[in-house]
Amino acid sequence: MSEYQYYEFVAIDRPLDERQLDEVRALSTRAHITPTSFVNTYEWGNFRGDPRVLMERYYDAFLYLTNWGTRWLSFRVPSRLLDLPTAQRYCVGDAASARVSGEHVVIDLVSGDQETDDFEWGGEGWLSGIVPARAELVFGDLRLLYLAWLLCVQTHEVPDEEELPVPAGLGKLTGSLKSVAEFLRIDPDLLAVAQRASIAAAPAEDMAAWVASLPAAEKDAALLTLLRGDDPHLRAGLLRRFRGAAPAQPGNRTAGELRAAAEARWKDRVRAEEERKRRAAEDRERERAAKRARRLAALAADGDRAWTRVDAMIETKKPAEYDRAVDLLEDLREVAKPAEFARRVGELRVRHVRKSSLMDRFDRAGL
């Protein structure tokens, strides 16, 4: 199988200028490059650039996908909207890490090699569905970081006793966060047990009350900044303040407890699926037995006409009809009197003794 590597970078906060475009074009003559995106696919060879460097210098989101199972997401966020200590509180291993680059914090999320037979060639479309998760993080939504921590829990990079607060709204993920969890192959059972401790996100009424509580001068300044367009992250800053004003939700499951609960949930699902299959098999067997009983009852009422059909099938001298005749005889054995059945089958053997193929079928069926 050929190797497959898919690279996609996106510039969100600002497009690349001409100098920057020339710099990234020098890395690949095959890539599709625009001021806001860089996409390249390799089936032979490797990308000459370093994705980490490109994220530090040019782009705000990155996705990497291979046919041997490696999956990598990276997000760059202004450090005034996400400080490094907060990011590193959740990104605690090789699967999820955080670093500072200039005025940004860069988060790397990696799902390691997992060979699979159902790999779908092509990474197109993944990042467009994931990118909104970065905006949610910029707005102060920590659910993306909690998914990063769960990824580290899954890879056993988090000590059993470690515990983190569960973000509000984890039980109802946005489409972009669901895509993140799916792309990184976060264990659905692990996510499900973590979601049990999550409260609902703050309703709009809470936001209205918070805005009403702000000093008038502060609201005037924010509105003026918005109209001037001086701060592209004004909304993000206000949303982060609003979320920060909400009381923290304590976590109630350690990493070890989450792993144990996820395993228990998986075992419950396996048992439930096995029970479902067992019941379905029993239902199918009951239905098969009922159909056979109805067929045998009709056959018993058929009398000599069934034997006439056997004769007609044999006279065709066709293998498929021989098989049908044997099947019908096996059913007749169930409803006919033993002596009568033995006599009739004996007569068939005498009449058709030269039909070796038919006799072989009779022998195998014990007729």
Image (tube, grey):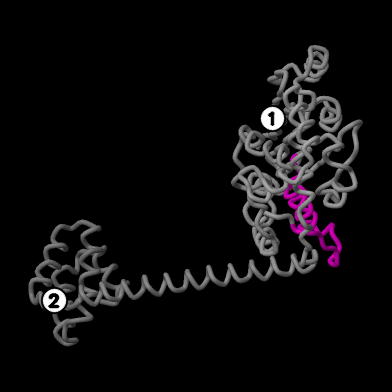
Q: Is residue 299 left or right of residue 85?
A: left
Q: Position of residue 161 (x, y in %)?
A: 85, 67
Q: Position of residue 300 (x, y in %)?
A: 14, 79
Q: Secondary structure at mark 2?
A: helix
Mark 2, Cα crowd under 10 Å, few <14 / some 14-19 / many 20+, is few
Q: Label 2 is placed on what type of residue?
A: Glu
What's the residue at 36%, 70% (across, down)?
Answer: 284
Kindly report the distance in space between the C-alpha atoms of the residues bearing marks 2 and 1: 71 Å
Mark 1, Cα crowd under 10 Å, few <14 / some 14-19 / many 20+, is few
Magenta stretch, residue numbers: 139-166
What's the residue at 30%, 76% (across, down)?
Answer: 289
Q: Position of residue 76 (x, y in %)?
A: 81, 35
Relative height, residue 67 to residue 187 (above, below): above
Instruction: Say if the magenta span includes residue 76.
Output: no
Of callouts 2 and 1, which one flags the residue occurring earlier in the amino acid sequence? Answer: 1
Confirm whether residue 27 shows in the render. yes
Nearer to us in this view, 57 or 337: 57
Relative height, residue 30 to residue 267 (above, below): above
Determine the image quadrant of residue 195.
bottom right
Which disc is residue 347 wearing?
2
Q: Work out which quarter of the rendered image holds the C terminus and state it.
A: bottom left
What's the residue at 9%, 69% (across, down)?
Answer: 308
Q: Position of residue 52 (x, y in %)?
A: 84, 33
Which disc is residue 43 wearing?
1
Q: Secondary structure at mark 1?
A: loop
Determine the image quadrant of residue 18.
top right
Relative height, residue 89 to residue 58 (above, below): below
Q: How many marks?
A: 2
Q: Work out which quarter of the rendered image holds the N terminus and state it.
A: top right
Q: Is residue 310 left or right of residue 79?
A: left
Nearer to us in this view, 260 or 344: 260
Which disc is residue 365 wearing?
none
